[in-house]
Image (cartoon, helix red, strand yellow):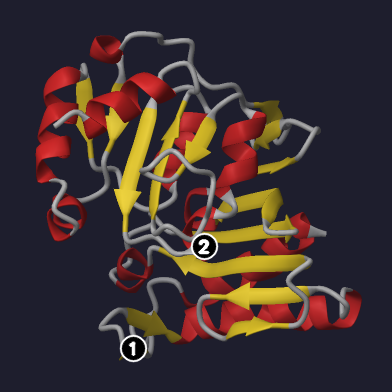
Amino acid sequence: MALRLADAADAVSMARFDAADLDVQIKADATHVTEADLATERAIRDILARERPEDGIFGEEFGSSGSTIRQWIIDPIDGTANYLKGIPMWATLIALAVDGVPQVGVVSQPALSRRWWAATGQGAWTTTPSGEPRRLSVSTVDTVDTASVSFQSIGQWRDVGRLDALERLTAAVWRDRGYGDAWPYMLLAEGRLELVAEFGVKEYDIAAHVPIITEAGGRVTAFDGTTTLSDRSVVATNDRLHEPFLTLLHDA
């Protein structure tokens, strides 16, 4: 079901990607929204309304409706700023949460012909150039000084008063980059990074990543180490370095 939702979303989002006449508006929170964000979420909601009317939905653009016991959590275009600039680093995020815990996740990046997905107990997977699925596994790196990390943006850390933690992190690891949006989480699940951390995230920004990372052997928590999605922070790791990273980030 989640993969079919992603197929429908890809068709809508790609139809308007890099369009010269793309309609772009500014939301109340000063972020951008395009006609494609709205149309993509509508396409997903229309299918769910027909085929899963008993399920609830929580989407970035149209809010929440229905049950919270089984709830689809949707970010129609994660990386709208990239989308409206014609940069192919954006994705549709689709998760199914049961009692608040994400059990299914799909991250689809159609501009780069990439997709990742997972369901609890069924492993995490991605597409390959041959079209065959490949199972994902996080890295076995077990020391902070040999780790490669993605911290998203400096501004996020500055806004929450955590620049000191970011400086400690970047000084301690082998390599740091701000890859941005959904992609670094998928690099983590593929075993190419050891940590992704950011602030200012909503449930729809992270829910789809949780099953993919955990089924690949990783771990996802908030900055304080709890497993909530509503803290507006996230620390995702290859698991074996989770506690060392949390200690580093909180070591005043």
Q: Residues within 10 Å of mark 2 (few under 14, many from 20)?
A: many
Which residue is at a point 87% across and 80% down the rendered structure image? 53
Q: Judge whether 223 appears above or below 95 on screen.
A: above
Residue 113 visible, this angle:
yes
Question: Residue 71, labelled with which disc?
Answer: none
Which residue is at a point 88% across and 77% down the rendered structure image? 54
Q: Judge whether 23 appears above or below 247 on screen.
A: below
Q: Quadrant of the N terminus?
A: bottom right
Residue 19: x percent and y percent? 39, 79
The residue carrying mark 2 is 203
Gap between marks 2 and 1 measured at Cα: 18 Å
Determine whether the residue tagged by mark 2 lies in a helix, strand or loop. helix
- Name the amino acid, label 1: Lys
Depth check, front residue: 80 or 22:
80
Residue 115: x percent and y percent? 60, 46
Question: Residue 27, labelled with which disc?
Answer: 1
Determine whether the residue tagged by mark 1 lies in a helix, strand or loop. loop
